[in-house]
Image: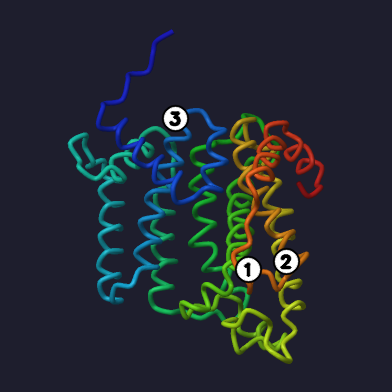
Amino acid sequence: MTRSPRPAPAVTAAHRYCETVTGLEARNFSYGIRLLPTPKRHAMSALYAFSRRVDDIGDGTLPSEVKEARLKECRILLERIRAGEITEDCTDPVALALADAARAFPIPVDALDELVDGVLMDVHGRRYHTWDDLRDYCRCVAGAVGRLSLGVFGTVAGAPDADRAAQRANTLGLALQLTNILRDLREDARNGRTYLPAEELRRFGCQDGFRAAAPLPGADFTGLMRFQVRRARDLFADGLRLLPLLDRRSGACVAAMAGIYHRLLDHIAADPAAVLRGRVSLPPAQKALVAVRGLTGLDARRAARGYPA
């Protein structure tokens, strides 16, 4: 049996840098990818570190024209990765790690361009009038990440419905992003952003926003949240059917990450106004329980039978 060549020290250091970024900035995400073998964990950390860079540009306080220029630089970097122009003497650890991951796995790098498209929507202050509008945004910023992750995970040889894996990964990304939107409702409002569809806000009398720590008089905030929770649960139910198409450790990783967000959704459903009082989160013990469920394969088996995980 021949051994794979050891990566250059610079590449190893680049992957360590990306893992550090992931551990510090995305605890829910890093909790899941711990379950992966090292090469896949490195690739997922590289994808996250690049995505974090793009998100930080969009969320920062720089003028819009500066943000657009920096996002253009991100696109140029992706072009260089596609062209195979990133070499070991590159001083950008994220670029070096991402280029190495793109060589090792069939990652659809074009999906990272979609992520940039989504962040540009934030930079331009786009509002979403219908669910179709918001779904387009979620597809860019989260569905694309699902499809990128699938490039790292791969599917089990001979798995039925493997041709639908990308669609289910995309749908699961939408479920995670909608849960994020509900959790961060007040924080986004403070930053002048409203993601929920305008026509649905009007339907529930919530068009005046979410800047207060309690629902505004006359608003059916609970009705709005329950409506969105049902939508997110439907997305989870479809997206989690991806699990049986993955190998055990990749399925455990996805089950852990999705399971954490599914539990967050349960907390929001139980107390919708909690998102106006502060950031809803899970204690470490619950996250550990979700990870254990993923490792047992229980969630994958339930998804295969069409039950929610």
> Closer to the observer: label 1 or label 3?
1
Residue 16 lies in quadrant: top left
Please give the residue where the numbered disc 3 appears in the rendered image. Answer: 39
Mark linked to residue 198: none
Side (left or right) of 198 relative to 41: right
Tell me the quadrant of the picture where the N terminus can be found: top left
The Cα–Cα distance between marks 2 and 3, rounded to whole angstroms, is 35 Å
Would you name the residue on which mark 1 appears? 182
- Three-letter code for the amino acid on which mark 1 is drawn: Leu
Q: Nearer the viewer, residue 11 or 284?
A: 284
Q: Earlier in the sequence, mark 1 or mark 2?
A: 1
Residue 86 vertical position relative to residue 231 in the rendered view, above or below: above
State the image coordinates of residue 187 (x, y, percent, origin top left): 53, 72
Looking at the image, do the residues carrying marks 2 and 3 touch, with CB atoms under 8 Å apart? Answer: no
Instruction: Please state which amino acid type lies under the numbered disc 2.
Output: Val
Percent x, y for residue 146? Answer: 54, 50
Please determine whether, in this image, residue 61 is positioned above or below residue 72.
Answer: below
Reading the image, the residue beneath label 2 is: 229
Q: Secondary structure at mark 1?
A: helix
Which x, y percent locates residue 68? 29, 70
